[in-house]
Amino acid sequence: MHAKYISTIRWKFIWAFILSILSGAGLLTAGYKLVNSTVYLSPERNPSPFTMMLKWVINHIGSGPVLFAAGIVSFLIFFFLFTRKIISYLEEITSGIQQITKLGESHRIEVRTTDELGVLAENINIMSERLQHSLIEERAAVQAKNELITGVSHDLRTPLTSILGFLEYVEQDRCRDEMELRYYVDIAYQKTLVLRKLIDDLFEYTRVNSGGLPLVLEPLDLKAFIGQLVDEAVPELNMAGMTYTMNDYTDEALWIQAAPYELVRAYENLIANAIRYGKAGKKLEISFERQDDEAVVRISNFGEVIAESDLPHIFERFYRAERSRSQHTGGSGLGLAIAKGIIDRHHGIITAQSDMYRTDFITCFPLSKEPLSKTG
């Protein structure tokens, strides 16, 4: 601790001050003896101009004022020499700060000492890294906003163009009879439903990913919760010609802390996605298990395979594999992004796996204690 205190800037300047005084005093002493021996102890018959000048200065000004002036000059010179490294390092830090303040420019200052300047340089480097991280996040946010606008424009234009086309056909009285009129109106109506769903999904995605209101968490039995959602999805399963099975690999309830009205949207989207793309497999499978201190739910379908190149991107907004971009699927490209946003807000994790046999969406949540009211 003592060595650390002595190595501070304050003590470095104190040592520089003391050494400057001692060095200046030594230089003046040596100079005084040299002048004394030159002028008085070794008189010359024909003195040099320098010797005559020294005698004149000493006789007319005095040795005291001359020594005082020489002492000040020598002190300043030695103080500058002893502090030049500190001043040079301070100038380097100042130059580094000026570089960092330039927008978008990255700079790192070398940490050379353990004193206050070294600590300052280290903190400036940390600040620079955080600033760069903030700039990267800002650029990413701008890019995400632009991509969102592009995606919304693309996905809104398609059904809107169809609606306008069919309504224009009707408005111009080009229908041959009432049956054809009803046919075109029905198509326009279906396209309007697609448009409304896209707008609803977009609103939900924006709300979830902007943070929204704080979640009101409460104990939730994940098994009973998802079981109820699957029961409610039976009509959709029947329409798709699918059945479902539920596999329970743990005998205990899986209690988590969750906001049910938020989490229901996430699992509705996952189940709807499994039905939409799993029709060919004719089956939906849901399994529950406990892994360490986490509740794991696996929602599986046996239909379309997700290409390995698509797997890292399926939770991105508006991302859909090309073979699934058909409007016949009814997908908005936001369902999985919304599900991930909601699960992330619950401190959960969602991943996907797919092979020639099955596609799994796996969610994991931290387990919580069972409510006292349920334990009797």
Image (cartoon, rainbow, N blue to C red):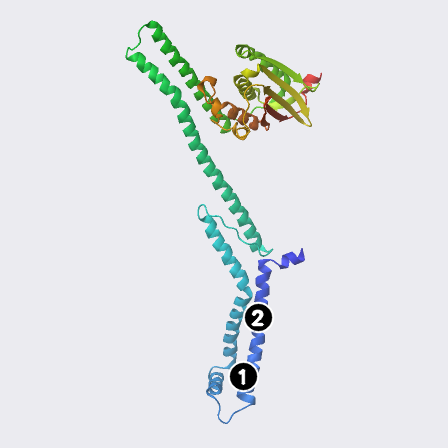
Q: Position of residue 318 (x, y in %)?
A: 47, 26
**Residue marked by disc 2:** 21
Residue 11 vs 268, above or below: the answer is below
| Quadrant of the frame with the N terminus | bottom right
| View extreme (left): residue | 172
Circle on res. 35: 1
Residue 186: which quarter of the image? top left
Q: Is residue 225 visible?
A: no
Mark 1 residue crowding within 10 angstroms, few (<14) / some (14–19) / many (20+): some
Please tell me which residue is depicted at 57% across the width and 16% down the height of the picture: 281
In terms of sequence position, does the residue under pointer 1 or pointer 2 come before the other?
2
Mark yes or no: residue 246 visible.
Answer: yes
Q: Residue at x 52, y 66 (%)?
A: 80
Residue, far bottom: 45
Task: Give the camera-side residue of 344 and 71.
Answer: 344
Q: Residues within 10 Å of mark 2 (few under 14, many from 20)?
A: some
Position of residue 183 relative to residue 64, above or below, is above
Quadrant in the rendering for residue 118: bottom right
**Disc 2 residue type (three-letter):** Ile
Residue 141 horizontal/vertical position (percent): 46, 35
Q: Position of residue 33 (x, y in %)?
A: 57, 82
Question: Which residue type does callout 1 highlight?
Answer: Val
